[in-house]
Amino acid sequence: MESPNAIRKPTYFERMRAEIDADPVRRERAAAFRRQIDMVNELMWAIDDRRIELGMSKAELARRVDRDASSIRRLFSTGGNPEITFVAALAEAVGLRVVAVPRD
């Protein structure tokens, strides 16, 4: 059993995070990537909210975009990085449009 006063070695994630934070270029790239992931998440949440409003099952959405139902369930439950054309197909299937607007 470790002593409560023992110094813990940083994890791999902590070491990588420290390296990124120490380099301004890498830090900005990581921040940009996080913003992009957040935008994709917002789109997917909007699509899923609309699907639910319509009373549409994930299986029905899958049929409308010619995909396997399990892949749609996985996409909405675990996330992912779908291609923009696929996001547009999902949006269209629930009656939405994907549009670009200026950032605040």
Image (cartoon, rainbow, N blue to C red):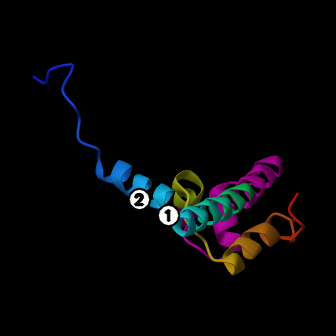
Residue at the disc numbered 1: 23
Query: Which label was assigned to residue 64?
Result: none
The crowd level at tag 1 (other Cα within 10 Å; few <14, some 14-19, many 20+) is few
- How far apart, in angstroms, are the residues tagged by discs 2 and 1? 7 Å
Residues at marks 2 and 1 touching, judged by CB atoms closer than 8 Å: yes
Residue 36, position in %: x, y? Answer: 66, 65
Image coords of residue 84 (percent x, y) = 69, 77
Dominant SS in magenta: helix
Q: Position of residue 70 (x, y in %)?
A: 51, 62
Name the kind of residue labelled 2 in the image.
Glu
Question: Is residue 88 depicted above or below 45 in this figure?
Answer: below
Magenta part of the chain:
43-72
Residue pointed to by mark 2: 19
Front position in the image: 75 or 83: 83
Identified by mark 1, the residue type is: Asp
Left or right placement of residue 22 versus residue 56 in this view: left
Say which residue appears at 61% left-offset and 60% top-offset: 31
Residue at image position (64%, 67%) is: 62
Which x, y percent locates residue 53?
Answer: 82, 47
- Depth order, front residue of 2/82: 2
* Crowd band around label 2 with a 10 angstrom C-alpha radius: few (<14), some (14–19), many (20+): few
Secondary structure of the residue carrying tag 1 is: loop
Q: Quadrant of residue 17?
A: bottom left
> In which quadrant is the N terminus drawn?
top left
